[in-house]
Image (spheres, grey):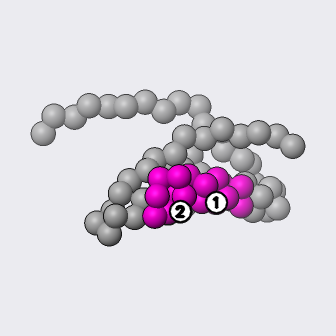
Amino acid sequence: MRKYKYRIVIEKDEDDVYIVSCPALKGCYSQGVTIEEAIENIKDAIKLHIEARKSLGEPIPIEVLLDEVEVCV
């Protein structure tokens, strides 16, 4: 079993629900009422996403670099 490590982005929506996504895996997102729940849910979503890619013979994206930018508006 191979371990994969991905960065996630957590945002809070207008209904106070935490929305979490994995930018390296396009379309991979989940949610939770708490941050902890959102993190556990995205772990499940990532596992399912990787399993689906494997079953289709698609490559598994490997995250290479994530950086921050600052924008003044």
Q: Residues within 10 Å of mark 2 (few under 14, many from 20)?
A: many
Rendered image: mark on residue 30: 2
* Whether residue 45 can be seen here: yes
Asked if residue 37 is among those painted magenta in the image, a careful observer would answer yes
Q: Secondary structure at mark 2?
A: strand
Quadrant containing the N terminus is top right
Q: Quadrant of residue 55?
A: bottom right
Q: Residue at x 54, y 58 (%)?
A: 37
Question: Magenta stretch?
Answer: 32-49
| Residue closest to the eye, 54 or 44 | 44
From the viewer's perspective, is 5 left or right of 56? left
CB under 8 Å between discs 2 and 1: yes
Which residue type does callout 1 highlight? Answer: Ala
Q: Quadrant of residue 67?
A: top left
Q: Secondary structure at mark 1?
A: helix
Q: Which residue is mark 1?
A: 45
The numbered mark, 2 or 1, whose residue comes first in the sequence reads 2
**Image coordinates for residue 60, horizontal then vertical, percent:** 72, 47
Rendered image: mark on residue 2: none
Which residue type does callout 2 highlight? Answer: Ser
**On screen, residue 53 above or below 6:** below
| Residue closest to the eye, 51 or 20 | 20
From the viewer's perspective, is 48 left or right of 21? right
Q: Residues within 10 Å of mark 1 (few under 14, many from 20)?
A: some
**On screen, residue 13 above or below 67:** below
**Image coordinates for residue 29, horizontal then vertical, percent:** 53, 60
Q: Residue at x 53, y 52 (%)?
A: 36
**Image coordinates for residue 6, horizontal then vertical, percent:** 60, 41
Dominant secondary structure, magenta: helix
